[in-house]
Amino acid sequence: MKGRTTRAICIAVALAATAATVSLFGQTVPVSRTAIVAASLRAIGSKHPDPSFRNPDRLAIQFIGPSERALLTEFPVEALNLDYTEAIARLSPQDRASVTTMYLRTKHLDSALDEAVRTGTRQVIILGAGFDSRGYRFRDRLRNVRFVEVDAGPTQDYKKQRVREVLGELPADVGYVPMDFTKDDLLRELVKAEYSQTERSLYIWEGVTMYLPEAAVTSTLHFLRDHAAPGSRVIFDYTLANDSRINDRTSRFARYGEMWLFGFPGTSAVDFLRRNGLNTVSDLSYAELAATYARRPDGTSPLPALSADQHIRRIVVAEVPRRAPLTGIVR
C-alpha cells in the first residue's frame, strides 16, 4: 500500500507539467501551459488600481518571460504589457472571470499560509509548485519555517533558473525536492530535505486535482493521512463531478494537452475527505469567497463577474486528525 500511495502522489505532482516544453541549457523541459495562463491571469490581476483588490502575486509578471509567452497560443499575451483596465478589455469573457477566480484563490491560499505560520506551523510543502511564488513573496514571514517545493526534476530546474533570473539567486530558505517519478519515493526524497512526519505542516496543492485521475487524488490524500503529523492541514482547489469541462476534449485545457479528469462527487469534497481520513476545516465556493474578498462596504465589486461555475468550483482546507480514525477509511 505504501508504495502505491507514494507512486500516486508522484503522479499527482507530475501530471500538471507535461504538455509543452521550453529550453534549458540546450535541452527541452516540460512546462504546463495552463500554469502559465494562471500566472498570466494573476499578473494582470496584480495591476488592479485599488490595492485592496489587487492580486497579491506581485512576482507573477516577472516569471512570464518571452519563452513562456510563446507557448500561449490562445491567450492575448499583449495584455501583459498593458495597464489593468486595458488588459481586461483584451481578454475573453472566460479569462476576465478567471482574473477574479485567480484573485480569490491567491488571497485565500495566502490567508491559509499566514494563519498556519501564525499558529505555529513550521513546515510548508508545495505539491506541484510550478510558478508558485509564496516561498519568495513571504520570505519575511517564513523565517524559521521549512519551505519545500516539490516538482518533477526538469520542471524544477527550469523554475530555479527563472528564480535566479528574477531574484538574482535562489533563496537559502526555500528547499527544492526534485522527483524522478519512475523510481523515487516521495517520503524518502522529502526526508532528504529534512521533512519531518512528526512536525505540523501545511500542504498547498493548487490547481492540480482536476487534472488527475480519481485514484491519484485518493492516494495523495492517503499519503497526507499516513505521513503528515496530526493537526497538519492541506488546502486545495477543486471542482465537482458535474462540471461540464471534465473529459471535455474541446476545452482549452484539452487543447493544451491537460484535460480535466476528475471532480468530487456530490455537492462538496467533505464526504470524500472524511472517507479518506481527513477532517474538513472549511469548504467554500468561489461565490462565497467573493463575498469575503471581493466586496466593497457598499456590497459592490470592482472585479469582473465570476463565471457560471462559481458554485461548483471550490477551495477546501482539511486537517489530519489528532487521533487516527477507526472506521470509514477507503483503502
Image (cartoon, helix red, strand yellow):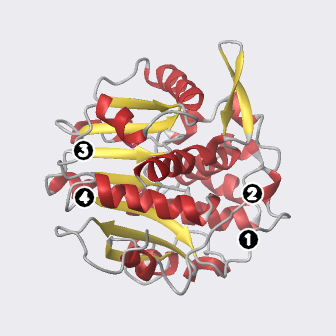
- Above or below, 97 against 121 in this view is below
> Label 3 vs label 1: CA separation?
35 Å
Label pair 1/2, CB-CB below 8 angstroms:
yes
Q: Earlier in the sequence, mark 1 or mark 2?
A: 1
Residue ID for mark 2:
253
Q: How many marks?
A: 4
Residue 63 at x, y percent in the picture: 56, 34
- Callout 2, which amino acid? Phe
**Residue 141 falls in image quadrant:** top left
- Callout 3, which amino acid? Gln
- Above or below, 4 against 320 in this view is above
> Label 1 vs label 4: CA separation?
32 Å
Q: Earlier in the sequence, mark 2 or mark 3?
A: 3
> Label 4 vs label 3: CA separation?
9 Å
Position of residue 77 in the picture relative to residue 317 (left or right):
right
Q: Earlier in the sequence, mark 2 or mark 4?
A: 4
- Callout 4, which amino acid? Ser
Residue 210 at x, y percent in the picture: 61, 63
Indicate which disc residue 232 carries. 4
Label pair 4/3, CB-CB below 8 angstroms:
no
Label pair 3/1, CB-CB below 8 angstroms:
no
Residue found at x 46% / y 56%: 54
- From the viewer's side, name the closer residue of 109 and 254: 254
Residue ID for mark 3:
123
**Residue 110 falls in image quadrant:** bottom left
Quadrant including the C terminus: bottom left
- Callout 1, which amino acid? Arg
> Label 2 vs label 3: CA separation?
32 Å
Q: Earlier in the sequence, mark 4 or mark 3?
A: 3
